[in-house]
Amino acid sequence: MTSTSVANSDRRALGWAGFFLSILLIGGCSALPDKPVRPAVYDFGPGLVPKATPAPPAAGAALPPLLLADIEAPATVDGTAVLYRLAYADVQQVRPYAQARWSMPPAQLVRQRLRDPLSQQRVVLSPAEGPAGWILRLELEEFTQVFDAPDRSVGLVRLRATLLETVNGRERLVAQRRFTAQRPAPSADAPGGVRALTAASDAAIDEIVQWLQQVPAPAR
């Protein structure tokens, strides 16, 4: 075999070696795990001025201070997952979106949102800030995006409000009411559900604020 033949043979061998090395590198790259996708984080937004500002109380009828207790919630809505139900399949099953979550549990978001309009009318205290004559306790019973068709859904919020009066160190029931609000979702996905649940929460909060205004102050 001539030196030229040997050189050609060596070049062919190197070429095949390079080809197989490229295949191995490509296979190795494809075997690397994908970079994890971080879920989108949502809240209720910056807290704009309510669309329907409740009328101020009558002159001389100052509203009493209010202790706004922490909002209770069942385990199904006590986390940060953005939840939905398929009413056309199995409405009793609560499902979480894989790539979406709330910045804090919905009960905390609702309480934060409710405190703003209440504070425009009266002194609002947290449990750690001391006692007050009136106590508002809320239970967040439902906070889900409900699909009645694959392309149609609403944000559904249901709250039960209990207003108590503290008399001689004891709590007395003043009034109790359930509030339900729903708003259509602009899209059949997590961002649409977040917008619908925010709008439904604002609607329920407006009703709660107006309801509290209508409850007569306790006689002293």
Image (spheres, helix red, strand yellow):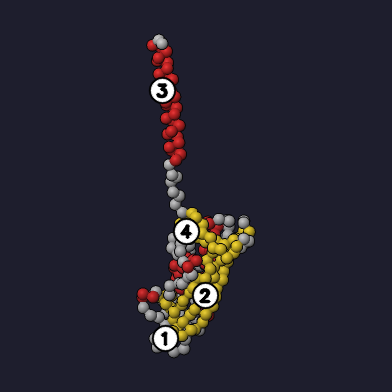
Foreground: disc 1 or disc 3: 3
Residue at the image point whose x is 62% and y is 56% from the top: 151
Mark 3 falls on what kind of element?
helix
On screen, residue 156 above or below 67: above
Query: Marks 3 and 4: CB-CB under 8 Å?
Result: no
Which residue is nearer to you in this view: 143 or 85?
Answer: 85
* Residue under pointer 3: 14
Query: For the residue marked with disc 3, what is the amino acid?
Result: Leu
Considering every residue shown, the one lying at the far top of the view is 2
* Residue under pointer 1: 170
Question: Which mark, residue 124?
Answer: none
Q: What's the distance in space between the residues labelled 3 and 4, CA to CA?
A: 53 Å
Query: Callout 2: 10 Å neighbours few (<14), some, many (20+)?
Result: some
Query: Callout 4: 10 Å neighbours few (<14), some, many (20+)?
Result: many
Query: For the residue marked with disc 2, what is the amino acid?
Result: Arg
Mark 1 falls on what kind of element?
strand
Residue 53 visible in the picture: no
Mark 4 falls on what kind of element?
strand
Query: For the residue marked with disc 4, what is the amino acid?
Result: Arg
* Residue under pointer 2: 160
Foreground: disc 2 or disc 3: 3
On screen, residue 44 above or below 170: above
Q: Going from the N terminus, do you reach mark 2 or mark 4 first?
A: 4
Q: Going from the N terminus, do you reach mark 1 or mark 3 first?
A: 3
Residue 130 visible in the picture: yes
Q: Going from the N terminus, do you reach mark 1 or mark 2 first?
A: 2
Q: What's the distance in space between the residues labelled 1 and 4, CA to CA?
A: 39 Å
Question: Which mark, residue 101?
Answer: 4
